[in-house]
Amino acid sequence: MNNVLHNLGNIPVTAATLRNVLPNRNSFAHYISSKELSGEIIRLKQGLYVVSPDVSGKPINNLLIANSLYGPSYVSFHTALGFYGLIDDVVQTTISASFRLNKQYDTPVGRFEYIQLPSAYYPIGITQAQSENMPFLIASPEKALCDLIIRTPKLLFRSKKDVITYLEDDLRFDTESLSSMDISVFQACAEKGYKSTSIQQLINVISQ
């Protein structure tokens, strides 16, 4: 039994997957409950589980969990910027974007927040990254920054100075990285009309 769970690693698995790989049982629900109680598996939500690190030998990876917990979604906002090393602040909540309604999950492995984005804007700048050789969807650095701008209440850039102040003072953002960013992603976001003036000011800072 533990060999089967060990082989699942730290990838979130559904109840259906567990039913297929675990030994046949007359009462599967009771069997899974017993494994929860023993701490061998962790329930993230109804029907979704992850194997305990003590059994899998791998640490829990919230970036891998985030895509599976609520979707379609991709990791973004402060979490993505932290993943890329663009901000130093450690954000305890794993924050993702979705075109579905806002959602929050408090799980035994941490809090996951999902912020709704307009469906026409949502697909821009989504990329695939890897953690421990496993892929997950995440915003590009440019898209993560745009997501943060359009979903931060009352945030409005009227000048390049406003942009620099926000990046350096509020985010403590690595502004030296701006020169290597892909302006076309910012332009694509601005064209959708959500805080386009603010995003254009960001483009102006990068282009100067």
Image: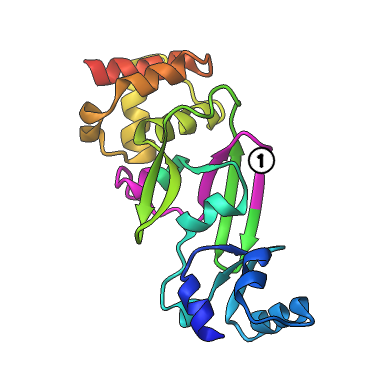
How far across and down, in percent of the image, does residue 27 sit? 79, 81
Q: Which residue lies furthest to the right in this view?
A: 27
Q: Is residue 197 visible?
A: yes
Q: Is residue 96 above or below residue 194?
A: below
Q: Which sits in the foreground, 101 or 168?
A: 101
At numbered mark 1, what does the secondary structure look like: helix, strand or loop? loop
Q: Is residue 179 above or below residue 137?
A: above
Quarter of image, res 122: top right
Quarter of image, res 116: top right
- Residue at position x 45%, y 13% from top? 197
Which quadrant, please, contains the N terminus? bottom right
The magenta span reads: 81-104
- Residue at position x 66%, y 46% from top? 103
How far across and down, in percent of the image, does residue 157 sit? 42, 19
Identify the residue under disc 1: 102
Which quadrant, please, contains the C terminus? top left
Amino acid type at circle 1 is Asn
